[in-house]
Amino acid sequence: MPSPKVASPKLLARRAAKVVLNHAALDAITRATADGLFELAKAIVDGADAPDATPFGEGLVDQGGVIAYVDRKLVATYSTGADPTVSKPRAARLGPGVVIIGGYGFPGRLQESGTVHQPARPFLTPKLMADLPEAEGFVKAACIKHGVISSRRAAARAAEVGP
Amino acid sequence: MSLVDPTGRILTEIRDDAAVIAFPCTRVRPGEPAGKTATDAGDARGPGEYVRFIVISRLGHARLKRAPIQEVRLLAKCYGTTKQDAAALAGVVSDAIHAKGHRISPSGVAIFGSFDDGGSGADTDPVTSQPHEDIVIQVGASTELIT
């Protein structure tokens, strides 16, 4: 069957439709993503088997923390220790979008990566690698919490994808 | 069959890389620096006697649930004579393994890809004050030997 020479009114209407970017929704998605990833980082820092057991005394890894930035602005901090202050590592570079930094303070990196006199005893990376595959779940939960998607729609999507 | 560790294969690739040898850095170690012997003063020396060496450690791994594949994260600590030297050595090591595709070692260790996953800039060792720069290496590998 030959194609019609004149485009159907339905098609013209679709072409003429103006697409308006919903900035409010985008902001909500960004907030939800930051919230979800912040919760993921908290789970990693809390779950890491830090070598901080007591009777070893002073000078051990004793405090972990998470810090979250959205578009270079500090939005949340979390600390596992008594001191609520969490500082951005000097080497961390902030860019646009969501940046979540989690880890343990000095001397955590010496435990994690070792020195010339002690082998690496990683305690954070194993937990990071175990939890990263679950990142989607954290972001999804945050999206539901922020009302970006409904729990019913999330459940329907999960049923479509399958276990 | 036991879980295959690709660390040795990556270490061999770095050690045998022409650019790393030409840098020159021939001291590539698993886990810890080599100690002092009757003929060698060891890798970790004091100020004024620094030598270049690389220590490869395994930070962690994650297995895929439904395929015999694992993602392994390694740490290459590249010790140099100065901070600039350490950074240059880290760059050469990065070139040796970054974006390298699939390969199978003679012993059957299959690597699908390896990437430089970033570092944190030059630092100094707390014991010897020797400058080093660390890079994290991400390796996709088979969990079984390919024979």
Image (cartoon, rainbow, N blue to C red):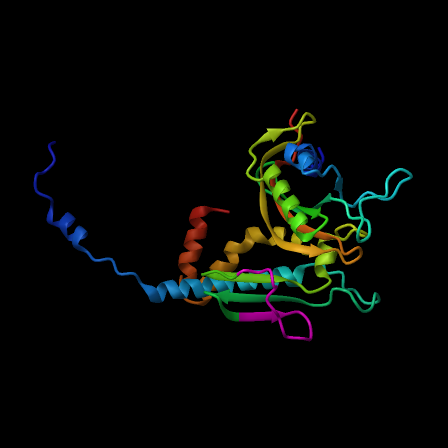
Residue A137: image location, x then y, percent: 51, 56
The image shows residue B75, relative to residue B18, as above or below, that is: below
Residue A126: image location, x then y, percent: 67, 51
Residue A87 found in image quarter: bottom right
Q: Which residue occupies 81% across, 67% down?
A: A54
Residue B69 seen in the figure: no
Residue A26 found in image quarter: bottom left
Residue B57 found in image quarter: top right
Q: Quadrant of the N terminus of chain B?
A: top right
Q: Which residue occupies 68% across, 25% down?
A: B106
The image shows residue B119, relative to residue A40, as above or below, that is: above
In the visual, does B95 lie left or right of B22?
A: left
Segment tinted magenta in the rendering: A76-93
Farthest residue, direction left? A5
Q: Is residue A91 magenta?
A: yes
Please state which of residues B127 and B13 is positioned toward the viewer in this rendering.
B127
